[in-house]
């Protein structure tokens, strides 16, 4: 697959995740929040796969920058998911 197409697909997946995090802020149900987080986690796997394809692409010129940027994004995303999971866990504990 062409490098530009892979980069565009990854950018679209990132935009989808941003929108889902915005929706997560509006959801009051912990079960719905958890389900949406599960979906976001699935998207993170998709992004990781795209990152791998991009990094391994023969036409990629600056591997170091791409690797650093993609890993930084993935780490920030995982931390954000973790914070929301902790928030949901706390809400569940105070509810019961």
Image (cartoon, helix red, strand yellow):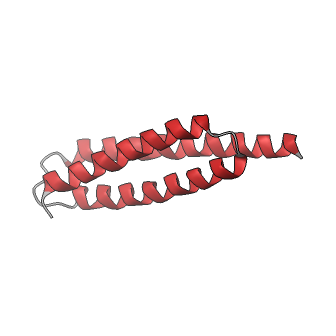
Q: Does residue 41 sit above or below 77 in this rendering? A: below
The residue nearer to you, when weighing 21 against 49, is 21
Q: Picture coordinates of residue 94 (x, y %)?
A: 86, 40
Q: Looking at this view, name the residue that lies furthest to the right.
A: 96
The outermost residue toward the bottom is 1
Is 19 left or right of 51, judged from the image as shown?
A: right
Picture mark count: 0
The answer to which of 70 and 31 lies nearer the viewer is 31
Where in the figure is residue 17, as x and y percent of width and height?
A: 43, 45
- Residue at 55%, 42% (x, y): give it: 79
Residue at 14 percent of width and 51 percent of height:
4
Locate residue 19 relative to residue 4 in the image: left or right: right
> In the image, what residue occupies the spot 15% across and 64% down?
1
Above or below — where is 77 with respect to 56?
A: above
Which x, y percent locates residue 33? 64, 47
Image coords of residue 8 (percent x, y): 22, 49
Q: Is residue 83 left or right of residue 39?
A: right
Q: Nearer the viewer, residue 29 or 17?
A: 29
- The residue lying at 16 percent from left, 45 percent from top is 62
């Amino acid at each position: 697959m062409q490098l530009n197409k892979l980069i565009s697909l990854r950018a679209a997946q990132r935009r989808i995740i941003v929108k889902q995090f915005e929706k997560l802020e509006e959801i009051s149900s912990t079960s719905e929040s958890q389900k949406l987080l599960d979906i976001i986690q699935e998207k993170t796997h998709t992004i990781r796969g795209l990152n791998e394809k991009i990094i391994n692409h023969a036409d990629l010129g600056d591997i170091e920058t791409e690797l650093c940027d993609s890993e930084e994004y993935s780490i920030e995303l995982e931390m954000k998911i973790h914070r929301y999971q902790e928030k949901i866990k706390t809400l569940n504990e105070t509810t019961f």
